[in-house]
Amino acid sequence: MDTADAVIALAAAAEPRCGDCLVVGVDGPSGSGKTTLADELVQRLGCPVVHMDDLFPGWDGLAAASGLLYEHVLVPLAAGAEAGYRRWDWERSAWGGSVRVPWTPLLVVEGCASTVLPAGGLVAVRVWVEADAEVRMARGIERDGEAFRPHWQRWAAQEAELFGADGTRARADLVVHT
């Protein structure tokens, strides 16, 4: 059984915690392979995805993202309503346009802090994706460019603090090492 199959099996057996919407969260540190797994899940499950990269209010905004996900996406979906959020414009370093999230019975949320509390309390399936630090850094620099190395280092410090305080990995239903 591959990783996507394992996540799909967990989702099939899970009870929704977000009203009648079953949320699958794909969390873990940057560069670990979360987006790759989430893309496969979305393709195979035919459901929408929310990317946490849209919710972070800049390079120092990791800790705020779970609350934004909770308030603007998960709480409305739990009430059976349409949700929506403002997307962070990384080039302008400011909030950009809005993203509409129609109510759905199944949603994948992908990215750092997607299962951190308070949002994590409404996520039915929590997947933690990890890789060695050197591998993650190399992937990030390859994707974003060498100029982003200082941002990546700053972000990694935030991840260690947030994930450690939250116990995110320990609450995962599935841990995947890539």
Image (spheres, grey):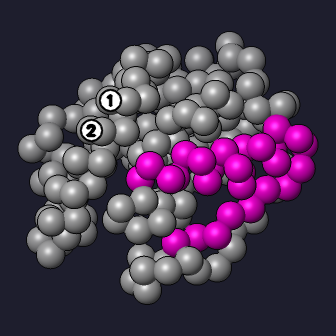
Please tell me whether the stretch drawn in magenta is mainly helix, strand or loop.
Answer: helix
Q: Is residue 37 left or right of residue 161?
A: right
Q: Nearer the viewer, residue 165 or 125?
A: 165
Image quarter for residue 141? bottom left
Image position of 71 with respect to 59: above or below? above
Assess whether residue 71 is covered by the magenta stretch: yes
Q: Quadrant of the N terminus?
A: top left
Decide if residue 141 is on the left or right side of residue 161: left
Q: Is residue 40 visible?
A: no
Residue shown at the point (73%, 37%) measured from the top left? 106
Task: Indicate left or right for 90 with 77 as reference.
Answer: left
Residue under pointer 2: 160
Highlighted magenta segment, given as a residue range: 62-88
Of 8 and 159, nearer the camera is 159
Can you tell which mark lies on residue 164?
Answer: 1
Q: Mark 1–mark 2 contact, CB under 8 Å?
A: yes
Crowding at dot 1, Cα within 10 Å, few <14 / some 14-19 / many 20+, comes out as few
**Name of the residue lying farthest toward the right:** 80
Rendered position, 132 above or below 100: above
Kind of element beneath mark 2:
helix
- In the rendered structure, which amino acid carries the disc numbered 2? Ala
Residue type indicated by callout 1? Gly
Q: Is residue 150 magenta?
A: no
Numbered disc 1: secondary structure: helix
